[in-house]
Amino acid sequence: MTTIDYESKIPNNVELSSDKRLQRALEHWLPQYLQWWHEMGPTDFETKDVYLRTAISVDSDGWAQFGHVKMPDYRWGIFLAEGNKDRKIPFGDHMGEDAWQQVPGEYRNWLRRVIVTQADTEPASVEQQRLLAHTAPSLYDMRNLFQVNVEEGRHLWAMVYLLHTYFGKDGREEAEELLERRSGNPDHPRILGTFNEPCRSWLDFFCFTMFTDRDGKFQLLSLAESGFDPLARTCRFMLTEEAHHMFVGQTGVGRVVQRACEVMKEVGRDPKAVREQGAIDLPTLQRYVNFWVSSSNDLYGAEVSSNSANYFGASLKGRAWEEKKYDDHTALEQSKDIETWDGKTLSHEEVPLRNAMNEVLREEYIEDNQKGINYWNRIIKEQGVDFELRLPNRRFNRNIGMYAGYRFDLDGKPIDEAAWKAGESAWLPTEDDRVYIDSLMVKVTEPGKFASWIAPPPKGINGNPLDFEYVRL
Amino acid sequence: MSTTTPVPASSDVAHLDFDIHPKDFTHWRLEVDGDVARLVMAVQEDKGQRDDYVLKLNSYDLGVDIELASALNFVRFAHPQVRCLVITGALDRVFCSGANIMMLRSSTHAFKVNFCKYTNETRLGIEDASEHGHFHSLAALNGTASGGGYELALACDKILLVDDRSSAVSFPELPLLGVLPGTGGLTRLVDKRKVRRDLSDVFSSIAEGIKGKRAVQWDLVDRVAPLSKFDEATTEEARALADTLPELPAEQAVEPDGARPVFREDGIDYDHVRFDIDAAARTAELTVTLPENAGPKNAAEAHAAGNAWWPLAAFRQLDDALLHLRLEYADIGTVSLHTRGDPAVMLAIDELLESEQDHWFVREVRNVIRRVLKRLDVTSRSFFAIVDENSAFAGTLLELALAADRSYVLNDPDMPVQLGVSVMNGGAYPMGNGLSRLESRFLGAPERVGEILAKPGLMDAETADEMGLATSAPDSIDWEDELRLALEERASFSPDALTGMESNLRFAGPETMETKIFGRLSAWQNWIFQRPNAVGESGALKCYGTPDRPAFSYERT
């Protein structure tokens, strides 16, 4: 007996109403998901109406329907980007074959691992951010937070759809474990380190959506090329939503920068003086950037990796924009010059390109980050302030890959432990920074008002004014 | 075709050191607290034996395993009060990821086989300590244990796995590398833990393995514990294991001091053992010499003598010589075994070994001898025992002759030769098949075992020949020539066929987990290691970690 009215509850383009297997899986999983949302989501705001964007179809009219809705009633849908019947596998050893509509047996376990690892990050960020609404700097920002949260929830759904539909009993079990692992939980943490870092303040949130969600973008881009067509189509649709998350991060930090510059013009560049005005001084912001960039750099894994070669060779995970950007899609004969570090000296080495795919993706990511930094520096320049934000070198503060366990400064110069100790408080957020940032985190709930540390955005959401009641408290 | 390793027949080659003191460990930490010892795996990535691979994720090479074997040996003698050994890892989320694949890929076939043999012996040593020694063992898997990492865990009495919803135990060899979990893994799954064969089949096909509750349901591990309770659970399990053994008084430790080999151009010298090679003939002589007199008269005196007590010192040296032979002298195919001294001295030592076997030190010395003799049993070289004038194949040393593929006994009234039997030949040193060497020898005439054991003491060559202890018993006129011909003929045969033949003939009688590990699992693994599907241009092992993906020949053999 079906107890859920699927079509009205769950907007989808995967023929859910006639898919008995998926229905059976969801019947079991949906209550657990709602329970998880209740325990680990922004629980204290469950009864509030939030102005959310809901996707009810994948066409241009349907993917962004705005309206006030209570979050537990949000219609988490299941969408795949429009398919192309004749799609061919675009890269790897299976290049040119028909894209797989079913999981190939020989890659079943690898694919499941790829999907579970990606899926695990989606609920993690909801958990990391669950208390932030209590200190939202405005209703506008609070709404953006919730929008990010429900979409991360939907991304989890998207991945769970794949597990339920294509991986049988194992897939259903993995789907349940996605709800059992919890961010920062000492017993069963999330799979990747960065997703266990506490998102303590809104500055962390903006940095997270800017830098960590951007990792998500590049992972999705590379999976959007997958020979396994349902995965490729799922990820392509997720990318449209991910773009909003990075918008929240990029403009959020941009508004912090804007506010800092406005204050600096009045009181000068002494961080103390800036703080006295209730703004976030740019050196402190830089330290938060350093932390989140370095932590997110880890997400790409080791520089030289057998897994990355396996996944590319098996046509499971390509490069970002594989079809558009590259000519040779086998990556067999080519090599990549990568930097190596043996604990003492930096040098260069040619490694087979397939084994360097993590690094290829990381480089794209770093380049994309730099654009965000440039955007903030333009704000600073427009304000007439003499300061430049920067990206830390990729070697800085790493916990995964060849640089892990060694000390480097922001320029990537190898340093000893003493030099690290001497520089650490200038490079990474100090407890003093965190205490100060915490002190700024006070909820502002009057429509159109913004906290002292952040400038208002240039415009509201979906053509609404800034003083629109984005969340009805 | 088999690959040949250049043989370092000279002293300019860096020799391996098989005895490492815990204070000099690179990859492990040994922490002893009362009757529980913790052995923590913390492999230094860039300190592998060769520099063409990196020991990522607590993967191991021979150097890491030598330290493990040294640690076991250290606990046996330096910490007699220890009743439980906990093996755990120092990395986050990973316990041990097994033998390093890049190392295997770039190693010669001969090295791979001998590496696996050594690691197998080390793991059997963990079980040996549990069965005969003074401690049980607990694998406290603080993260994923894959391949050899899980095989190491399987060698322990109990396995505790952290349940963080991610950490698993796994055998990725088949799906990922196209080879086998060849360090006892498959055998221990079904023979020791008695995991159902179909579940074992599924488990061994999933690269990422099985985690959490299902790992317990399938009996792949004994218990899971959440991260926050993992240390507590480890302590609890270690205590429970320790308490199943009798408490041992705080005895004076005997820190093992190693075999102290002295290398020379054409061999190795030890206090009681000599190894002499004839590179041109591809043969060597291994000679064990008895002391002038038996020395200690009781356990206390033997304990006081410690490392210097002859049976301990001599068999450690023999052990060391066998390891150098295996790993450093690949083309020395035939080894003659010699003993020197007064056989009565050996019989006197045996009397002490038997009468004082309840003393921990004496028991551990017996354990050493048993393991070294087993190491000899599985060494893939032809061994001929040469029972000549002044030899002393009696009691414990008679086991060398019984372990040999053939024994040549000089039978000449003018040059009297004495062999000897002691109670130690009656089962003190069982082979891997669970039988004594005498029992294995006389499977077709089991009554002969009793007849021989009923005549403890010395016997002459004639009697030995009548009793079936000599393969051939020429007189002094024929002696030299017969030996020469035997050795020359042996050296001319195909070394591969010899290895196969010897290991088939040596282990007659019942199968045990141990004989299956060496005789079936290792043999299959060694075959797979040679096949194009593993090591050919498009073989799985060759392709692993490279941009190329394996292409198999799907023909079954």
Image: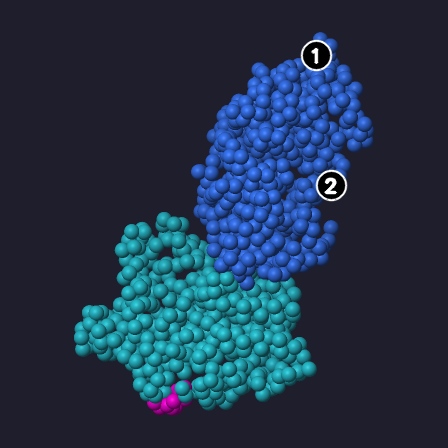
Chain colours: A cyan, B blue
- Circle 2 Cα neighbour tier, 10 Å, few/some/many (<14 / 14–19 / ≥20): some
Q: Chain of mark 1?
A: B
x%, y% of residue A356?
47, 60
Q: Secondary structure at mark 1?
A: loop
x%, y% of residue B98?
56, 49
B316 up-or-down from B126: above or below: above
Q: Secondary structure at mark 2?
A: loop
Image point (69%, 51%), residue name: B194
Query: Which residue is label 1 attached to?
Result: B416
Q: Main secondary structure of the magenta part?
A: loop
Q: Looking at this rendering, what residue extends furthest in the left direction?
A: A267
- Looking at the image, residue B305 sits to the left or right of residue B518; the answer is left
Image point (29%, 51%), residue name: A418
A212 up-or-down from A146: above or below: above
Camera-side mark, 1 or 2: 2
Find residue B377 and report its image quarter: top right
Q: Chain of mark 2?
A: B
How many marks are shown on the rendered structure? Answer: 2
Query: Which residue is label 2 attached to?
Result: B511
The answer to the question of whether label 1 and label 2 lie on touching residues, with beta carbons closer than 8 A, is no
Image point (62%, 29%), residue name: B357
